[in-house]
Amino acid sequence: MSQQSQGGAPSVPVLLATHLVLVVTTLAVLYPVLWVLKMALTPSQAFSMDPMPFPTEVSFQNFREVIGTTAADGSWLFGRQLLNSLFVSAVTSALGITLACTAGYAMSRWAFPGRDIGMSMFLVTQMFPGVVMAIPLYILLDEAGLLNSMLGLALVYSTTAVPFSTWNLKGYFDTIPVELEEAALMDGASRWMTFTRIILPLARPALVVTALFSFMTAWNEFILAATFMGDERAFTLPVVLQSYVGDFGTEWGRFAAGSILVSLPVMLLFFALQRFLVEGLTAGSVKG
Amino acid sequence: MSRASPALPFAVAAALLASAPAEAVELTIWHAYRGDERAALEALLVQYDEAHPEVELRPLALAYESFVTKLEAAAPRGNGPDLFIGAHERVGQWSATGLVAPLSLDTSGLHPATVAALTYDGQLYGVPLAYKCLALYYNTDLVPTPPRTTDELVAQAVALTRGDTFGLVFEADAPYFFAPFMHGFGGGVFDAAGEPSLASAENAAALAFVADLARVKKVIPEEPTGALVTQLFNDGKAAMVVNGPWLLGELKPGLPFAVAPLPIVSATGKPAAPYLTVEGAMVSGFAAHPEEAKALALWLAGPESALKRATQGRQSVATLATYDDPAVAADPILSAFRAQLDAAVPMPNKPLMASTWEPMAKALRRVMRGDYTPQAALDEAATELAVTTRPEPPAADPTFAWIALGLGLAAALGALGRQLINPAVRADIKRWAFAYLYVGPAALAMSVLVMLPFVVGAAVSLFSHKDGQFTYVGLANYLDILLARDWPITSALSFYFTLVITVLWTLANVVLHVGIGLGLALILREPWVRLRGLWRVLLILPWAIPNYITALIWKGMFHRQFGAINAILDAVGLEPVSWFASFSTAFSANLITNTWLGFPFMMVVTLGALQAIPRELEQAAEVDGASAWQRFRHVTWPLLTPALLPAVVLGSVWTFNMFNIIFLVSGGEPDSQTEILISEAYRWAFTRQARYGYASAYAVLIFFVLLGWSRLGNRVAGRKVL
């Protein structure tokens, strides 16, 4: 490692310019986000058009109201819905990755008949505009008895995430030298062992990206969730968030507070996963 | 709590009821109320539930945006509510599809306008519970007595417009807010015979009146969005605003204001009459227990419930007796809206109404921008309405389609069979048999949950849709689109124009997302960068926060008079820009917003993909004397592309269909020029006569365009990537 950083040590102007780029980009990213924070912390439900994105009064009322939502019978809804969201997103991630990593691996390594067509079909599904699919999907889930079911929802979400995940993993598997597996197979390891013990650990950066992507697919979706779920207790958080948007007006304070709450788990997840995205794995330096 | 399966067949439920009459009947009630209104309704439902052991109520509050989709999907399959509370506007369409059941009841205690709103073709379809309409809010510090006529209104507004304060603020370029003046001048969207009359002289006079307020007298600010109206009124910088009861929840505590009915239009002596939206309790046409549902609906409209809804839910109720109650009579706001009710026009509930909003909005904006005279803009709107509501194509003979389908299937099976007979292919299949185990689960899931629904949805493109009835029309929808029969090719509404914009939109986005994402990823992997973890987490914020709110914040930042972007331009000495008045700036506004939203994903993917490249290679190149650019161009980039390409290809496909940014930021302005194909498809399905077949044809064409696009991508990449 020390040799590497010596080799890459930049000159002072480059160092300054790089950090300047980061600061400017981050400010551009944060500026609109500050408005979300401002609306969340302002007790009013109005949309703020003030050019200053700082709250003039700070109150946690919106957060309290969003978190404290209860059902008609007094049971705590927000916690329940947060768990639903976490469950559906986690299952989507797990299911999506399982389906995608095996498919992506087979497509990367083996020239079986139908592979090219299969890969094109996966891509082609991404070209289907969602507008035409909601009602047929509803009927399908209804016939399968999977309406009102978290599992049904996660299944639909994971098929939404599988094409990108498969392609992304396939692209990454392509960069891993085949010689590694050949050596393992030569030593008598089974195909499945080689895949799970050698290839998957090496593909960790791509798996992390894929997991995050699948998680986000499920985490922010509300139209299908609202259509498929028939009980408040089964709703996910984005459905609840969307209910602050009304026919005539929107409860912006609560919507903003909810948006921030909804984005926190994603930030935490990314924070926990990001080290896999930047720490070299190819040189065999597996991080402990 | 035990919950019966919603899939429980009706027959079984009925049999159970017959055998056990003491068993309570489950009644499902759907509504979209929030806040106080919701609390009041739910308290009433609990009260009813306790008083009526024969029923057990299952209320469900739904988001307004998903209410209609869910209702129309669930009800025909027996999963819908017994009773639902919704706005009356769709009653015409719902009565045709059987979604609402006709009712007969004594309506004497209810305001006649609210009953008329829920009546379609002479038949009542719901029990009126409450109503919403616009009225005049005024700041009592600035306006001691509200104007009674528009002459007074104009005089006061002009006198009060000073510095950064505006006399009269409302969404003058939105048809709903224009409607009071349209009606006051004697106009309307439909004439007395019920035929569309967008371009009537009365409507033009009303539009001239409003345009004069905005453009000549300048008592209305530029680009008066709903958010701006609230902001200015809250800040005491709007003397009067035209708005509905929903504004109350957004007002600052302590703001000195009052509400009055809208003034009389001086030119005609008629009151400025806003649209009336009535919330009715409607018995579903698919209700399992219609009798019980009707009984509940009647009780909800009754005096006891109405009083609670008015006092606790702060709701303007349809029940007349409630307004005699001392508590309600003493409430100045409820009284003002009650007075406005007498001069309100029920929003037309015929299906044609839904198609009028878009052309009217376009006409209003054209006049407000100063591009058109009122009459010319309305003439154009009438033409557009005539095209979007033209008769459906004639029914076609499906024989040919069956033959084509049969031949196609036979050809496909034949090709597959030929492959399977081929010994080389069979040997290959045997050799790679295990590979199918790896691919199988994903392929199966995709076939069932993605392919199948799409094929069904795509088949709809061969049909026309009217009131829930689908008629086979062959390729008529495709021919209409591809031969540009509706609009000239150069029109912003033609398929080809929109296609060009969509391609431009996709290319520009992908270049920016990948460029910025790649640049940041290259920086953020360098070990010498300080606080790498912090930057990385902060830079994914746009991906993490729901884009509905951030897209609207961007829209606010692009505001002509009050937006942050123009404030910055002004600070550095540049001219402010009317972002949504011309194509290039409106397109840029969409592009900037979507780039802000889209680069974090590309950054994350690139960070992952960069891990596939051993740093030793780059270091070796550096030792050999390669410059930073040469190292990137000849070492990093070639190794990066295979891992990055999927994200680029799929990213371009997603951007091609990125509907909500267009919808939320520019909304197609100016004059639909910034619409993309998917937002056009959406409009055909949801705002233009529910032409599902036409919208589906659009979706299928989008699919083929993207298929061609990916083939082109292969050519450009010089190898098979897709």
Image (cartoon, coloured by chain):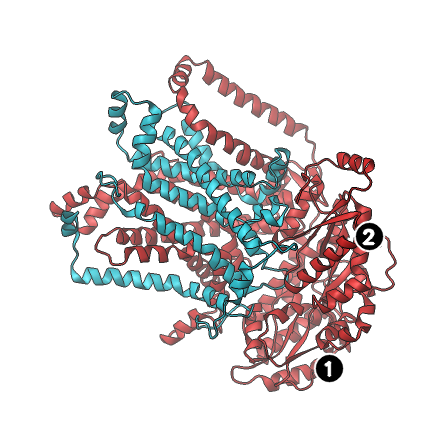
Chain colours: A cyan, B red
Residue at the far left in the pictured view: B624
Residue pointed to by mark 1? B148
Could you tell me the amino acid type at mark 2? Ala
**Residue B159 percent location from the top left of the image:** 61, 87
Image quarter of the N terminus of chain B: top right
Query: Can residue B479 be seen from the camera position used here?
Result: no
**Residue B635 percent location from the top left of the image:** 21, 43
The 10 Å Cα crowd at callout 2, few under 14, some 14 to 19, many 20 or more, is few
Could you tell me the amino acid type at mark 1? Arg
Sooner in the amino-acid sequence: mark 1 or mark 2:
1
Q: Numbered disc 2: what chain?
A: B
Task: Please identify the quarter of the rendering in which residue B321 is found.
Answer: bottom right
Instruction: Using residue B64 as the reference point, say whether residue B338 is left or right of it.
Output: right
Image quarter of the C terminus of chain B: top left
Instruction: Using residue B717 as the reference point, say whether residue B489 is left or right of it.
Output: right
Residue at mark 1 to residue at mark 2: CA–CA distance = 42 Å
Residue pointed to by mark 2? B295
Task: Please identify the quarter of the rendering in which residue B140 is found.
Answer: bottom right
**Residue A185 percent location from the top left of the image:** 28, 22
Seen at 51% across and 63% down, the residue is A63
Is label 1 or label 2 in front?
2
Instruction: Using residue B396 as the reference point, say whether residue A70 is left or right of it.
Output: left
